[in-house]
Image: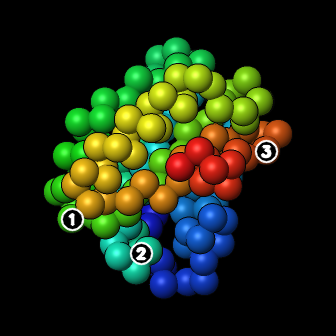
Amino acid sequence: MSITGLGQRRAMHGLAQPISAFLDELARHHVETAVFVFLDHGGDALGWHRQSSDHPEVVAVRIRSVVNRALALEAAQVVMAHNHPSGDPEPSAADLRFTRQLATVLDALEIRLVDHLVLAPGGCVSFRARGLL
């Protein structure tokens, strides 16, 4: 994914068009993949991290790796997204548990978890819109 041209108008969930296009593509992947976009205070992308799994239905993400990357980039905000190859964008109990843990750790470091998006060909669920963040 290229994160050039980030000054363009905001698209899906307030993210720049190149990031939104990448998330649209991620929704169609056949292997569960998590993506973290690290943002400055103004919402411009500083960088991103992608983690895939060998298993089509599960991706293991270490909170420590997300925090280390956020700190290295001096990010003020993070957007997380991952896909559900099953086609059902409803968050699982594990998704909810992980998101709450990540938000708590990031908050202690004064980094805001803007949203966690669960993507599938059939739709997208925003944790923020659901009041889960």
Q: From what the image shows, is residue 15 above or below residue 5?
A: above
Q: Pick whichever, 97 or 82, lies toward us.
A: 97
Q: Which mark is residue 44?
A: 2
| Badge 1 vs badge 3, beta-carbon distance below 8 Å | no
| Disc 1 to disc 3, C-alpha distance | 32 Å
Q: Which residue is mark 3?
A: 123
Residue at 19 percent across and 46 percent down: it is 68
Earlier in the chain: of badge 2 and badge 3, it is: 2
Q: Residues within 10 Å of mark 2 (few under 14, many from 20)?
A: many
Q: Residue at x 37, y 29 (%)?
A: 61
Tell me if residue 23 can be seen: no
Residue type for callout 3: Gly
Residue occupying image coordinates x 66% and y 65%? 12
Q: On the image, numbered disc 1 is attached to which residue?
A: 74
Question: Within 10 Å of the Cα at label 3, are there few (<14), some (14-19), or many (20+) other Cα atoms?
Answer: few
Query: Secondary structure under badge 3?
Result: strand
Kind of residue sitting beneath label 1: Glu
The single residue placed furthest to the top in the displayed view is: 55
Q: Is residue 89 left or right of residue 70?
A: right
- Residue 132 placed where, x, y %? 59, 45
